[in-house]
Amino acid sequence: MESYFKNERDYLLEILSKLVEQNTTNPPGNEYLAAEVVKNEFEKLNIPYEIHEKTEGRSNIFGTIGKGDKTLLIAAHLDVVPAGKGWETDPFKMEIKGERVFGRGVLDDKGLMASALVLAKYLKTIENSLNLKIVIAGVADEEKGSEFGMTWLADSGILKPDFAIIPDNAGNLCEINIAEKGNLKIKVKSYGIQAHAMSPEKGVNAIVNLSKFIVELQNYKFKYESNLLLDKPTMNIGLISGGTVANSVPSYAKATIDIRYLPSQTASEIVADFQQIGEKLKESDKSIDLKFEIRSDAKPLYVSPEHPLVQIIQSEGERYHSKPVKITGMGGGTVCKDLARNGALAICYSAGDLEFYHQVNENILINELLDYSEIMANVIQNFNQKI
């Protein structure tokens, strides 16, 4: 099989060059430009495909290979971050320098989209041996929250895989991300009584009362069970506002708190703790009136390292490279959370160096992109035997 994928170098670079040339900077996205490239390849390979848009121009495309009751999704995203200044090459013209390829998206994530199409080309040749459906997808809007991409696709049921491998965590093919902290945003609202600044005693200052809560929050200790793959939960008070003019006692103030929490915790428990802090403050100062609102809650992700799909990726990666493939977790988030929330077992495994994400002169080793295609082909064939 090795010679097959190494011989696909020119095909990979041809696709990647076309993808990079499509300016899908998000915002505004315009992923339809890159989706057209993917569509053309699916048509050449005789792979049936679908295109879905929540709004015009924000295209999501996926093709299906094989048949069976279970579905495995491999999804790269078609949007890219702004190019920025300081490039040594044209960011929207792929350029090869030695063993590396340069251009916006060659790593994040158009290079992996090209790898997935190389993989699709191979899988089509063995399609009759598959009792597992493989979906190769190019999705929109990953860089700005996936409202027009995976979040919508997963929550609406358009994409409903049993398993998913997302090539968007770098790691040079030596890291499998199976755990992510939850991301909880809580709005704290403080209510007071408006009054003239010359007689502040006639009012209740909502900003002052909110400040008392924030000060008390510095002593808060999370309750949690430690996780081997994730560090401790964190909290950041990132937004605060209140009042209208300086010569009026403010009757309203608010703060938004970003919390990254562990699988052993729940959003409701954290909010209940905050409410308890507010109640204790009110016992000592009846003027304090605080309300708490969950603005968003992306629940934690955790997949057992013993799951067959994780084990197969790890063993195939180590066999291919003759070096360890680590099981990891992250404090941030990926579209794996969207898929997991809707019943899929989703993990990240990818090529490339994390240090080049979103940087000028973005680049990746060409051989890593081909290696990814080959490793995934081995993983799929082995996993196919276990389904």
Image: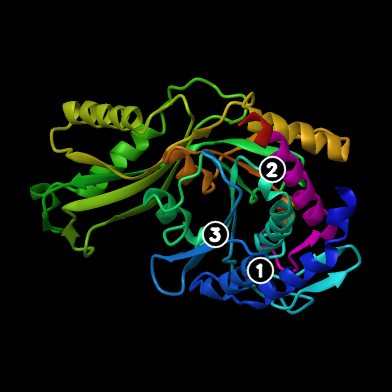
Q: Could you tell me if the residues under marks 1 and 2 are in contact, i.e. CB atoms within 8 Å? A: no
- At x 65%, y 50%, the residue is 167
| Label number found at residue 129 | 2
Residue 13's spot in the image, x, y percent? 79, 68
In the shown orientation, is residue 109 left or right of residue 298? right
**Of the residues shown, which amino acid type is indicated by label 2?**
Ser
What residue sits right under mark 1 in the picture? Answer: 41
| Main secondary structure type of the part rendered in magenta | helix
Q: Nearer the viewer, residue 127 or 323?
A: 127
Q: Which residue is identified by label 3?
A: 62
Q: Secondary structure at mark 2?
A: helix
Residue 367 percent coordinates (x, y): 85, 56
**Circle 3 Cα neighbour tier, 10 Å, few/some/many (<14 / 14–19 / ≥20):** many
Q: Secondary structure at mark 1?
A: helix
Judge whether residue 377 is colored magenta.
Answer: yes
CA separation in Å, label 3 and label 2: 21 Å
Which label lies toward us, 1 or 2?
Answer: 2
Q: Are marks 3 and 1 in contact (CB under 8 Å)?
A: no
Residue extending farthest to the left is 202
> Which span is picked out in magenta?
357-383
Instruction: Name which residue type carries label 3.
Output: Phe
Name the residue type under label 1.
Glu
> Residue drawn at (17%, 26%), measured in percent from left and top?
283
Residue 24 shows in the view: no
